Image: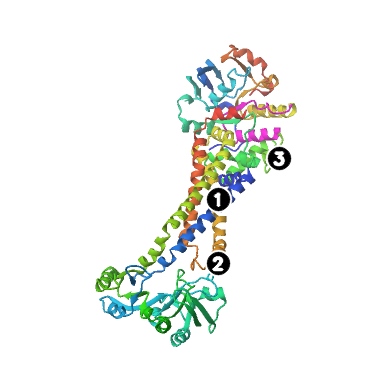
Amino acid sequence: MSAPVGQQGSGSGSPAIDIRAVSKSYVRGQQTVPVLKDVSFHISPGEFVALMGPSGSGKSTLLNLIAGIDHVDAGTILVGDTDITTLNESALARWRSRSIGFIFQFYNLIPVLTALENVELPLLLTPLSARERREHATAALALVGLADRMDHRPSELSGGQQQRTAIARAIVTDPDILVADEPTGDLDRVSAGEILDLMAGLNKSLGKTIVMVTHDPRAAERAHLVRSLEKGLLIDSDPADQKDHADPALHP
Amino acid sequence: MLTLRFILKNLSRHKLRNCLTVVGIAVSVLSFGLLRTTVDAWHAGVEASSATRLVTRNSISLIFSLPVSYEERIRGVEGVEIVSRGNWFGGEYIDEKNFFPNFAVDARTYLELYPELLLPDDQKAAFLRDRKGCIIGAKLAARFGWKIGDPVTLKGTIFPGNWGLTVRGVYAGRDKGTDETMLLFHWDYLNETLRKTSPRRADQAGFYIIGITSADAAASTALAIDARFQNSLAETLTETEKAFQMSFVAMSGAIVAAIRIVSLLVIVIIMAVAANTMAMSARERMGEFAALKALGFGGGYLARLILGESLAIAAIGCALGCGLTFPAAAAFGQAVSQYFPVFQVSALTVGLQGASALVVGLVAGIVPALRAQSIGIAEALRRIG
C-alpha cells in the first residue's frame, strides 16, 4: 500500500534504471526505420535525467521503452531487479501502475472529469477505499498547489494548472519513477518555469527518479544529467561530466 | 462509483450527437413496440381462444352454411358438452366505415360458452327476454355513445334490410384479450325474419361453437363430429377455436411477416446508427484511452467504459421509447379500434424492447471496445502530439 502523497521518504528506495544495448525500429510502409541503435546507459536512483536531441533522434521512443509503453527489438531494460522487457502486457500494465508516473506534453487529462477525479483515477487500480482515494487525491493536488481548483474541469484550468493536475495524477500512486515527455512544451515561459520548479522539488523532496524528454535547454538545466541522442545513438558518452550542469541545490 | 460517474459524464461530451442517438433509439424502440403490438393485435383472437371450444363450419368454405338440424347430431357426439350456433351478420351501422363485428347467436348457449363476456345478471335476463335485443362490448358502447335501451339499426349486407335492435346489455371483457367491440343479437330473430323474407336461407347456421369436456379430447371429438357428416350434402370441418382463428390470421400471413421483418429492420438500422456514434466517440478518444492504458488500466477497463457508455445511451433511449409506447399504442389503438379490438402492449413486447435495446447497446459498443483494447499506447500518444 502506498503512503499518502507528500509523506514519502527520500529516494533511497527508488530503483536504478539500467538500459542495456537497446535497439528499436519502426516499420513505415515497406521500410524499416531504425530509431534506437544499441543504446546503453544507467540512471541512478533519485536522479533527474533530461533526454535531449533533435526531432526523430529517438528520445521519446527511449522514454516510452523506459516507461514500459513500448517494446524493445533487442536489449534489456532493468528497473531495479525487474527486466521489464520480459513482462507480458498485463504484467507490464500492473508494473506501470505501481512504478511509473506519467507527465505528458498535452496533459492527457480526462476533460469530463474534475481535477480531483482525474487525480483519483489511477487509484482505482489500488485496493484503497473511496474515502482513502479521495484523501490521497486531495493531498496530491494540495502538493502541486491546486487545493482550490479541485472541482474544476480541465477546460476551466490554465495550461500550467492542467500540467500541475497531471503531475498530481502522476505522483498520487507514489511511483518511484516519473517520466515526462516535453512537460513544458505546451506552456508559456512562466508556467514552464513553475512546472520545472515543481518537478525539481518532487525530485528533491520525495526522491522521485525523473526521466524527462525536452527540447528546451532551460528545462534541461534543471536536470542532474543531460543525455543527448542523435539518429538513435547516444552522443554524450561520459555522463559524469554532465553532473556539472545540475543545479546542486536540487540534487538529493 | 468513479467509474460509473466517468461513464455518465462521458455522455455529456457530444450532447447533440448523443441526444440524437438516444432519440433514434427511442423512436426505433417505439416503432418496434408498436409493430409488435400490431402483430399481437392480429393474433388477439387466437390468444383469446379457449382450448375447450371447437368450431364447426362447412368444409367447403365459411361462406357456406350448415343445416340447423346438425346441432342435435353434434350434441350427441361423445365429449360434446354444449353446442351453440351463430352467423356472421356483417351489418353496417349507418356507414360502412363504422365497421364492427356483429353476430347472430343462440344467446343462452353462447353466453354459457363465453364466460369471459361479463354481463350483469339483470342485463343478461333483459337480453334473453327481448328477441330484438342485443348486447354490445364496452368499447363499442364507448365508441358510439350507446347506452342500455338505445335503439340500433344495422343495415344488412349479407342479410339485406334494416335490422332494428335495442341495446339490452353492455358486456366487459374478463381478460385483456377479450374483444369488447362486438355486437351480439339473437339468431332466432335473424332466422324468423329469414323465414319470411328468404325462406331458402332460413334454418341455416354459419358455424357451431362446441364446448367440450376436456381439451385433451379436442382432436378426437373434432374427428368424430366431421365423421358424422361425412358424405352428407354439407360436410363439416371442425377445428379448435384457436385453429379457426389462426386460419383468419393465416390469410394475412404475408402482411404479418412483413411487419415482423420491418420491426427487426428498424432495430438493425438503429444498431448501425448507434454503432457509428460509438465508433466516432471512441475514435476521438483513442489518445485518452492510450493515456489510461499508460496509467496501468487494462483493456478490460476500457471495454467496460465504452460498453457502459453504449449501454447507457441504449438504456436511456429504451426507457424513453418504452415510456412513449404506451400512450402511442393507446392513441394508435383508438384510431384502428374497428380493425383491432384489442391493441394492448404486452409485457413480452416491453421485454423484447428492453432486450433489443440491450443488443443495440452491446453490438454498438463491441467493435470500439475491441479497438480500444488493442490500441498501441506509444502509437496513439504520438498521434496526439
- Which residue lies most toward the right here? A190
Helix, strand or loop status at disc 2: helix
| Subunit bearing disc 1 | B
Q: Share a chain, discs 2 and 1?
A: yes
Q: Is residue B101 left or right of residue A222?
A: left
- The chain identifier of the residue carrying mark 3 reads A
A57 or B138, which is in the foreground? Answer: B138
Q: Could you say which is closer to the camera, residue B374 or residue B200?
A: B200
Would you say residue B74 sits in the magenta stretch?
no
Secondary element at tag 1: helix
Mark found first going from the N terminus, 2 or 1: 1
Q: Residue furthest bottom?
A: B129
Q: Nearer the viewer, mark 2 or mark 1?
A: 2
Which residue in the protein does label 1 denote? B25
Q: Where are the magenta residues, as a range?
A: A159-188
Q: Name the residue: 54% across, 62% down.
A: B329
| Quadrant holding the C terminus of chain A | top right
Q: CA distance from mark 2 to mark 1?
A: 25 Å
Above or below, comparing residue A58 to residue B58 in the picture? above
Label placed on residue A156 = 3
Identity, as a three-letter code, of the amino acid under mark 1: Ile
Categorize mark 2 by other alpha carbons within 10 Å: few (<14), some (14-19), many (20+).
some
Q: Amino acid at mark 2?
A: Gln
- Left or right, B287 with reference to B207: right
Query: Could you classify mark 3 by the number of other residues whose Cα lies within 10 Å: few (under 14), some (14-19), or many (20 or more)?
Result: some
Residue B267 visible in rendering: yes
- Please say if the residues under marks 2 and 1 sit with CB atoms less than 8 Å apart: no
Q: Numbered disc 2: what chain?
A: B
SS of the residue under disc 3: helix
Residue under label 2: B334
What percent of the width, then of the height, locates residue A150?
67, 42
